[in-house]
Image: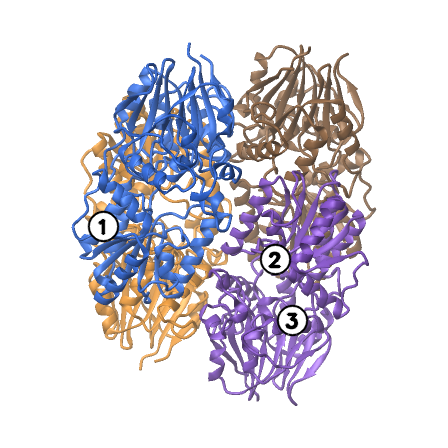
Chain colours: A brown, B purple, C blue, D orange
Amino acid sequence: MTEIGIVAVGGYNEMGRNMTAIIIGEDIVILDMGLRLDRVQIHEDVEIDKMHSLELIEMGAIPDDTIMKEINGTVRAIVCTHGHLDHIGAIPKLAHRYNAPILATPYTAAIIKQQIDSERKFEVCNRVIPLQAGGTYQVTEDISIEFIRVQHSIIDCVLAAVHTPAGAVLYACDFKLDRTPTMGEAPDFERFKSLGREGVIAMIVESTNAGRSGKTPSEQIAKDMVRDVLLGTEESDVGMIVTTFASHIARLKAIIEAAEEMGRIPVLMGRSMERYVSAARDVGYLDLPSNVEIYGMRKDVDRAFKRIMQEGKNKYLPIVTGHQGEPGSILVRVANGETPYTLDPGDKIIFSANVIPSPMTQANRYALETKLRMKGARIYDDVHVSGHAYREDHWELLRMVNPEHVIPAHGNMEMHGHYIEMAEDAGYVLGDTVHLLRNGEVLYIEE
Amino acid sequence: MTEIGIVAVGGYNEMGRNMTAIIIGEDIVILDMGLRLDRVQIHEDVEIDKMHSLELIEMGAIPDDTIMKEINGTVRAIVCTHGHLDHIGAIPKLAHRYNAPILATPYTAAIIKQQIDSERKFEVCNRVIPLQAGGTYQVTEDISIEFIRVQHSIIDCVLAAVHTPAGAVLYACDFKLDRTPTMGEAPDFERFKSLGREGVIAMIVESTNAGRSGKTPSEQIAKDMVRDVLLGTEESDVGMIVTTFASHIARLKAIIEAAEEMGRIPVLMGRSMERYVSAARDVGYLDLPSNVEIYGMRKDVDRAFKRIMQEGKNKYLPIVTGHQGEPGSILVRVANGETPYTLDPGDKIIFSANVIPSPMTQANRYALETKLRMKGARIYDDVHVSGHAYREDHWELLRMVNPEHVIPAHGNMEMHGHYIEMAEDAGYVLGDTVHLLRNGEVLYIEE
Amino acid sequence: MTEIGIVAVGGYNEMGRNMTAIIIGEDIVILDMGLRLDRVQIHEDVEIDKMHSLELIEMGAIPDDTIMKEINGTVRAIVCTHGHLDHIGAIPKLAHRYNAPILATPYTAAIIKQQIDSERKFEVCNRVIPLQAGGTYQVTEDISIEFIRVQHSIIDCVLAAVHTPAGAVLYACDFKLDRTPTMGEAPDFERFKSLGREGVIAMIVESTNAGRSGKTPSEQIAKDMVRDVLLGTEESDVGMIVTTFASHIARLKAIIEAAEEMGRIPVLMGRSMERYVSAARDVGYLDLPSNVEIYGMRKDVDRAFKRIMQEGKNKYLPIVTGHQGEPGSILVRVANGETPYTLDPGDKIIFSANVIPSPMTQANRYALETKLRMKGARIYDDVHVSGHAYREDHWELLRMVNPEHVIPAHGNMEMHGHYIEMAEDAGYVLGDTVHLLRNGEVLYIEE
Amino acid sequence: MTEIGIVAVGGYNEMGRNMTAIIIGEDIVILDMGLRLDRVQIHEDVEIDKMHSLELIEMGAIPDDTIMKEINGTVRAIVCTHGHLDHIGAIPKLAHRYNAPILATPYTAAIIKQQIDSERKFEVCNRVIPLQAGGTYQVTEDISIEFIRVQHSIIDCVLAAVHTPAGAVLYACDFKLDRTPTMGEAPDFERFKSLGREGVIAMIVESTNAGRSGKTPSEQIAKDMVRDVLLGTEESDVGMIVTTFASHIARLKAIIEAAEEMGRIPVLMGRSMERYVSAARDVGYLDLPSNVEIYGMRKDVDRAFKRIMQEGKNKYLPIVTGHQGEPGSILVRVANGETPYTLDPGDKIIFSANVIPSPMTQANRYALETKLRMKGARIYDDVHVSGHAYREDHWELLRMVNPEHVIPAHGNMEMHGHYIEMAEDAGYVLGDTVHLLRNGEVLYIEE
């Protein structure tokens, strides 16, 4: 029988720089090539787009794929299950080493192309093949990739089933089981179950929030909270600015809809805001109201702010970058007084985002919030729900898919520990059917 | 001009045992008489209903109203703004000392009567006068009490405006600004504003959640989360038990509605569950579906559990006491195996409640959850939103009411500190227009 | 070659109920049989001494040694490396199942005998053999046990080397590398190193504090802090009470010495205080000043307190049980006003102990401290240092002993995770040379 | 009688930028002029030495002394009680506005002069007058300043008693009651008590650690821990670097002594290291062994590192700046590989410092530690004790000095809250004898 191997390339010891390789006899399928941003942030004056992959590997910022040299077999496909940087951010640095196409859903594919275009060190020529959720791509005669619809904090996210002669390997890295999503449809529960009945030899699954009790709240909850914060106020005439993840199209849609209801013109600002939104429009996933304005370049942003100040802050709802206090982002520039937009006491700043739990980010957010508060702004923090499955979502997925082996990924040892304890509750045995892998390790599954 | 004094009797140094007295010349209005449960919990084998008030005062469990002896004036009314124990729980111990009626909304009045009935030490004969939200009660020729509609984690909660010749004193202890409540109507914002325009000399306001950023989520959010947890599962056939605050009628209604949608019979269990729900039905605030079952006494509860086991756990949704792991509560008895209801691995236990942040409660909850987990139960924790205003709700209320003086209450020094910093943002000055009072202190407001 | 197996019986998924078995061909050596107290504390009215082992196993309170039935081989010895309950507390419940002597250092042996004597359910007849640190005991022709001197928060603690034909297995559960101990000598570093040179096939090692940075402070630090708190005050005339671990003889000695220096008579109070101290005197490890008083029984304690009140609180230093707020302990009885000792405002209560991080204990401590504070006592908390090795102590031991395989024990998954990351720094590889075991798992070491 | 006023200029709402003014009839004495570093750190590219005071006031970095314009009276003296930046850092920006001498102990005076010399915006010509601990300086005919010996985390720290016709005002900002200091003598307890007997009308006292239980450990504890970390290792041949506060001369002395005992040459490195140590030698407080090397300038540091690498890392003990991860500090440059000193796996880095609890600092430390760990360094963190009095030290000082009024300073509202609760235990009453002041507020004490 075909031997199946699972190579933990990156993201097994940490959050970020996710990369897994599945060995199927002589063939290899790679899943994700991600970037760990906080390993970049601890250095000053780093320009990633000009750096060599080996340097980034040494920094711990991208997966150490040099271990792939020791693996026999040919890489047949690189599969990305959604468009976040910790899943696709290393493609510009690593993909060209493999003579294999990149497979992704249409929105993810569009983001990947943007990434490749902005790379300044390497030339990445791999073909990028869009595949719809629900679709299947034949990799070799024996191997096919199936995309199964799921929800996450970015649109067009899927789980990838790698069908092999020995059975399916399910890659479930980054998902939530949202039954009332605000964009797209609920996860394809029926397919999870039928896959389980067909037989899954292994599931590689994110452990990020396996330690959190219960189930992840639906994006509908976030939408309602956003709406309540924006519309549920007796001080509706003040300046208001919202900041959120530029890639979180569903959230942006909720904010834009609230702006319409408020009678304010939504103005999207910031380079990444422009890029992610444009991509969503291009692939036909986002239909914006005609009055929405979008400005990516600094010059255009500042001109728009100037106009807003002239016409009245209460006529507009700027939706901007800067939720993590990123230096150079729009909200940071506003807080520094570097734009024409001036803050008055009582203006509202809404963070429709959590704070990423890294000391680097926490410092940036602290600096930003302190400046905003000193100008009299009122802060609405964490108007947000997570995009990662909590413990009971994991419990249900595990029991639906019923894999022979389960491997937590996309987290550190503590997160994996939480997943393992849940899996033990479901009857799995550590070292036998649930496995704790470390970066650089290969697990061969014996049938 | 009439001198106004504010007496901080209890709840200014701690959470619980709230009591404030307003001196208006020769007259006095008392607001709330609460019980601090965790000062009882640190002792073993305490039977509150048989204890003397002086003993409970010494324990720090009820307000030390002996300071009232040093205050000149006659108590004309005791006003309770909602039915939680930390606001009404000391009435059976203290009210009889004052020759004054007790004023409360109908639901609160019903709860107060239950409290008085179960007292075994003192005979409390004060008249209990129900007053609707929106209504006004003339206390003396010069003084009247107005109830203003607001939302909280219990129905029929109001703010109380004490109208005096010197202007109004607003008592805003325990509220949230919920614009999409699931029972009752939104707070009476128009009245807050008109009161502000008429002139408020002082506002006494809870500081409990003044340290939490943003605004309190609506009860609608909790309702949606409850529904999602109960209905949003692929394992809908297992045993499920929900526990929540027996006094949180809106939450109970949401759970019961979800049960109906699930096709399960809702079964309310536990003595306090029966008491609070009966009171809500009696005053006409709760209209239950015909199939709802309610059992207060242990014998009846156990008989019902036996029947549930016979007919199938998946046909019923027990809604029980025990969310804080209270010894003797239904859920604790289930976890101990002291009822006919047996837990199977995979059964779901839903806590539609937060954990009260006291070490005594945390230990009870830990013991309960450990036992439940050891039996294989899946725990859904904190399916809940707060009933207390967050910082920006306070900001808006303060600016609507625009009182000359503001006094944080219903919290400890840290909570008051958060409120004071917010009030300073709004232009108030500590020691001049915003005041930090300690239990036993009197503040005279000089005009 | 002789096959070596390591059976993780208990203490691999949790703190407490430690038990490991080493399989050496046809022979078995058991290491520790411990009790997990917080699994007892979550139940009301439990009397351990009357309970059956199977019931305690089901509660998760003692190791589930029923798995030993599936192991081929004969148990030749039960070895306990120190006298804490989480290492010896299950001996009265489990040891009689094995026809094997119990091997322990003299002090540990004395404590074990006390345990066996107070058992009321089982009759435990295993021979208890004392072995000095530095000594070796021949178990079979091929197998011997060597005790190697180390330090911990109890006297007479050792590491146990199990010498087998395949090499040594080192059991290092509970130790600190204290170079300036206040009783006994520093750990036998030379032996650790020579053992490493001889070849250690496996080390089983506690992971409890592997997550704490740096190295554990010496007991000398605790001694200095105790002395500073007791003597370094301008209010030396007030009542003072110290509470600490009854089994922590070195700490008791430091407190007694401080009492002498203060000119106060040290009075040890509480049943466990009497038991542990008597054992230490009996084996000749503790030489108390002639004026020390010791009272174990309630009647005697209360009589002593009465005398102290008559002669002056400032003439005595009561050293009592109750540091974790245990119900019925002396300090709890003092706080409850159940003894003749009355607290005055300004009296000092010194906790020469940490709070054990379990919600049950935290609640007990909270109740105790609240009562003490309400009586005006001044609290000195955490006048203490840990007895468990921190990360860098582990680093050094690991490099001295240089085992082929290392297995973290005596902790939960998070603690093991910290140990594994440290071991990885030292070149170990998870699943290959460092192993994460779960209760009930057997690891066979292939040479 | 002379009216006494206390002006809370800065440091009453926050840590840092301390400044208090005492009004004595027509005369004013200023105490401290400090800098709040984390209000500078949230901005990029700030050069404090070139900035105007008004800009720094607006940033919240230095005290807003513009309120002094509204105070009648003449400033007669500026008193600094020790040399930390949060007490003297604003002198170069503010002192020139007052025609008054600066009074400080010899070491503090030396540090102040260094500060003034490095200022590039203002010319500060105030006379700096050294006054020994124990000495008294006559400010006017009626007013004198007495310096009373105390301990803190910097040498030559005092409490300042401002003697006025109405009695003494004691300024107790930053102290610990260390009875076994490693440099200098214990606090002058006798003087505290005699002052108390003479009558103190007000005490202004730091609240920083009033929330921490018990008493601050002695610096002797830190010295023993430093020695244990440096000498108590079986891996004594590896590279070792220590970092600590450059101004903490007693700690530096302990480290240097340990280096001598290790047979390593101590090498002090970094600009601030050179400055503080030189000042201590100049005033005769520090007598260094002849082999100690000190390098302030980058060129000299790097040359020394080169030599260390050539001669052997195990022959030297670099004692460097960088304990808070400050950009540009020596340890950060080592971690970045910007010096000739290369780190090998197993090298030890000892932080003889806590992490300052600001997100900006935490991020710097995280970045530094991450880089060090990635190079294989072993980290010893928090080998340190605090220099600020804990709750029971405050309790004792308060009862010795027995002031009529007490005002917590040098902290935020939460810290003041803890102090107030302690003072209440001692019989003080909030708003009457213990006062919560906010920046900009004046308290007049009525006799």
Distance (Cα) linking label 3 and label 1 = 56 Å
From the top left corner, tell me how far across and down residue C441 is, in percent: 51, 25
Q: Residues within 10 Å of mark 1 (few under 14, many from 20)?
A: many
Dot 2 corresponds to which residue? A377
Name the residue type under label 2.
Ala
**Cβ–Cβ below 8 Å for labels 2 and 3?**
no
**Cβ–Cβ below 8 Å for labels 2 and 1?**
no
Q: Nearer the viewer, residue C171 or D179?
A: C171
Q: Are marks 3 and 1 on the same chain?
A: no
Whether residue B146 sits left or right of residue C188 in the image: it is: right
Q: Quadrant of the N terminus of chain C?
A: top left
The relative height of residue A99 versus residue D44 in the rendered view (above or below) is above
Whether residue C53 sits left or right of residue D330 in the image: it is: right
Q: Secondary structure under badge 1?
A: helix
Quadrant of the rendered structure where residue D340 is? Answer: top left
Identify the residue at horizontal 52%, vertical 78% (top origin). Answer: B7
| Chain of residue at mark 2 | A
Dot 1 corresponds to which residue? C256
| Chain of residue at mark 1 | C
Q: Secondary structure under badge 3?
A: helix
From the top left corner, tell me how far across and down residue D40 is, in percent: 47, 50
Between disc 3 and disc 1, the foreground one is 3
Dot 3 corresponds to which residue? B114
The relative height of residue B207 versus residue A172 in the rendered view (above or below) is below
Distance (Cα) linking label 2 and label 1 = 59 Å
Q: Nearer the viewer, residue B120 or D323?
A: B120
The relative height of residue C20 versus residue A163 in the rendered view (above or below) is below
**Cβ–Cβ below 8 Å for labels 3 and 1?**
no
Q: Quadrant of the C terminus of chain C?
A: top left
Identify the residue at horizontal 61%, vertical 10% (top origin). Answer: A72
